[in-house]
């Protein structure tokens, strides 16, 4: 029992270190592990999001303090993201979210390759891109929905798309992480209403503790990494996770 709890702590630590530094993959990596243990998709997604309420709060606050948050981008993403997350959480409580995963993974695979291409060919921007059009709100809606359905996906969907469009990676990661707290909070409230968590408290607490320890370290790592290196790491991470999801879906 104790070893299982420590394993959940380790998973939460590693997942948040990746998510805080690259703006994605806490939910994807954590949820994949939980599903491999035979935990139902809705319960796995709910456990991850319950833990993420704290970890995303710490990560978002740290990014804010480090100056990595663009408030115009946050305003575009926040409300649509929360609405999308609530819709996805509602659907997941009555539908198997694995049905939609191959389609999301295919989209993310393309986005990952685009980011890697841009890292080597595009002119790196010295300042954040301050224009954020209405399409970003639609992206937030879609990202929130995918995040709830797949047990993770807010970062991969939103961050990868924005960076692929040429947004400044460091500020994009910080803004998306900051907004993720509110998206996750909304989903968690709905999951609490719809599901019982008595048997999953160890998972939630382990993920939460590991993630809370890693969150400030990950945000600091984002500030230290060169932009080109950051983009390459984001792209490779998305490609690998997407290929893995597609392979598992085909089996």
Image: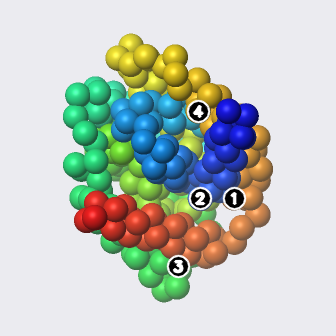
Determine whether label 2 and label 1 are within 8 Å by CB.
yes
Name the residue beneath numbered marker 3: 119
Location of residue 73 in the rendering, given as x and y in whole percent from the top left corner: 47, 45
Name the residue beneath numbered marker 2: 22
Furthest residue in direction top, as rendered: 193
Name the residue beneath numbered marker 1: 222
In this view, 242 is above or below 123: above
Q: Nearer the viewer, residue 217 or 37?
A: 37
Marks 2 and 3, how far apart in space?
Answer: 14 Å
**Image label count:** 4
Compare marks 1 and 3 and give the one earlier in the sequence.
3
Give me the residue at 38% from left, 19% from top.
Answer: 195
Compare marks 2 and 1 and give the one earlier in the sequence.
2
Q: Secondary structure at mark 1?
A: helix
Compare marks 4 and 2 and give the one earlier in the sequence.
2
Marks 4 and 3, how far apart in space?
Answer: 37 Å
Give me the residue at 39% from left, 54% from top.
Answer: 157
Mark 4 is surrounded, within 10 Å at the Cα level, by few (under 14), some (14 to 19) or many (20 or more) other residues, namely many
Front of the two marks 2 and 3? 2
Marks 4 and 2, how far apart in space?
Answer: 24 Å
Q: Secondary structure at mark 2?
A: helix
Compare marks 4 and 3 and give the one earlier in the sequence.
3
Name the residue beneath numbered marker 4: 203
């Amino acid at each position: 029992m104790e070893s299982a709890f420590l394993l959940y702590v380790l998973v939460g630590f590693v997942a948040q270190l990746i998510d805080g530094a690259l703006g994605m993959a806490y939910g994807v990596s954590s949820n994949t592990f939980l599903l491999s243990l035979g935990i139902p998709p809705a319960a796995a997604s709910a456990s991850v999001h319950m833990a993420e309420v704290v970890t995303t709060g710490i990560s978002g606050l740290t990014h804010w303090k480090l100056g990595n948050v663009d408030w115009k981008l946050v305003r575009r993403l926040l409300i649509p993201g929360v609405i999308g997350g609530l819709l996805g959480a509602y659907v997941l409580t009555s539908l198997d979210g694995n049905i939609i995963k191959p389609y999301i993974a295919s989209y993310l695979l393309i986005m990952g390759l685009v980011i890697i291409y841009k890292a080597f060919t595009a002119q790196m921007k010295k300042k954040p891109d301050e224009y954020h059009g209405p399409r970003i709100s639609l992206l937030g809606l879609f990202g929130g929905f995918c995040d709830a359905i797949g047990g993770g996906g807010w970062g991969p969907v939103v961050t990868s798309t924005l960076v692929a469009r040429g947004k400044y990676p460091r500020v994009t990661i910080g803004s998306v992480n900051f907004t993720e707290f509110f998206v996750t909070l909304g989903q968690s409230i709905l999951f609490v209403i719809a599901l019982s968590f008595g048997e999953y408290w160890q998972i939630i607490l382990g993920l939460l503790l590991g993630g809370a320890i890693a969150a400030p370290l990950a945000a600091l790592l984002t500030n230290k990494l060169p932009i080109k290196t950051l983009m390459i790491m984001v792209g490779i991470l998305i490609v690998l996770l997407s290929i893995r999801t597609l392979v598992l879906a085909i089996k």
